[in-house]
Image (cartoon, grey):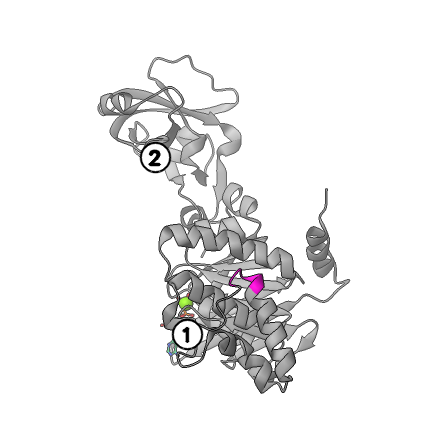
Amino acid sequence: MATPKDQAAAGARNGDAPPAIALRGLRKSFGDVHAVDGVELDVAEGEFFSLLGPSGSGKTTVLRLIAGFEAPSGGSVSLAGADVTRRAPFERDVTTVFQDYALFPHMTVEQNIAYGLKVRGASRKEQAERARAALASVRLEGFGGRRPRQLSGGQRQRVALARALVVRPRVLLLDEPLGALDLKLREQMQTELKELQREVGITFVLVTHDQAEALALSDRVAVMNAGRVEQVGTPGELYEQPASVFVASFVGTSNTVTGPAAELIVGKAGTFGIRPEKIRLLAADAEHDRRDHSQVHGTVADAVYLGDHTRVVVDTDAGERFLVITQNLDTSAADARALPGERVLLRWHRRHNVPLHHAS
Ligand code: ADP
Ligand code: MG
């Protein structure tokens, strides 16, 4: 069933409603560094969109170009159908949450949140009411009188979110907003961020280098590499149908086969990705089944028991090293310890051979 969000995304693609954000041929160079090198993107109204890529791939620069903190070397930025390429940041209906939160230390939480309303000339009464509502939306009722230093990292992050949301932007830009938090708090804040976006219904663009975070939160993700977008898709599309070797190895992990090994194992020329959890680890003398399956023999080089699953490294007879992830349905730590040196057969359904192109 199509959700309103699916329809919004489809509408943006069909051109019925203008996309919340449209980037066309966007470029930004710093001297001879091409930080952003020809980016084309449409983000639909109400979408939770992420820019995912390794450090230095140009994510922050794209965000700063959308917000207007940088002027592009080429191309254009449109918001809700209006070309804003030459407009100043305050003339764009976007708000940015930075990784370091940038709260004013000498102001109370409530003053921090109300600040954006104050500079826009809102009455004291309106400031107080909206600041309190924003605090409630990030579940910090009663914290309005504290100073930032009297809060935990997660609470400061929520204040930064409330401060951004109180001005009711059409688009919220978030640059690695959870980067400073420890893993547990980070996972909790991910859930809260997603709930918050559903509640307020505005367009979120999240920058992250953490593929798990991008997959968990986003309607769609753009994978960036060296200033370019390698692929745009839903989390499922990126994981199940990665277009390139880069995406296959950056979003999750993947075995790749190419050259003679591909012809031997897949039966076709080319480069293919095979996800480690799609592969079954069988005894070396298991019955052959080549009709719907690809298979290869090998010797276990290493097996790491991780409680719920075991990571098995196999040196295949085709010369490629494979990673296989097996769920420990019936097996235990002792089984994992016995694996190294064993001869095994790896088998997976042919549909898990995903063709990849090398270009990046
Ligand atoms: P990311 O956010 O993905 O880590 P950035 O957008 O911050 O990447 O940076 C992309 C590239 O542009 C990097 O090589 C970075 O060093 C360079 N860069 C970013 N900002 C500047 C700047 N103000 N001056 C010079 N180089 C910059
Ligand atoms: Mg960055």
**Marks 2/1: CA–CA distance:** 50 Å
Question: Judging from the image, what secondary structure is the residue with disc 1 in?
Answer: loop
Residue 18 image position (x, y, % from top left): 72, 67
Tell me where the magenta segment starts and ends, as one range: 136-140
The answer to whether residue 17 is above or below residue 217 is below
Residue 74 location, quadrant: bottom right
Q: Quadrant of ligand 1?
A: bottom left
Foreground of the two, 84 or 103: 103
Residue 34 location, quadrant: bottom left
Foreground of the two, 93 or 131: 131
Disc 1 target residue: 147
The answer to whether residue 68 is above or below residue 217 is below
Residue 210 image position (x, y, % from top left): 42, 54
* Residue in the image at 64% along x and 74% along y: 78
Residue 218 image position (x, y, % from top left): 55, 53
Disc 2 target residue: 323
Residue 9 falls left or right of residue 117: right
Q: Exactly how many numbered labels are in the figure?
A: 2
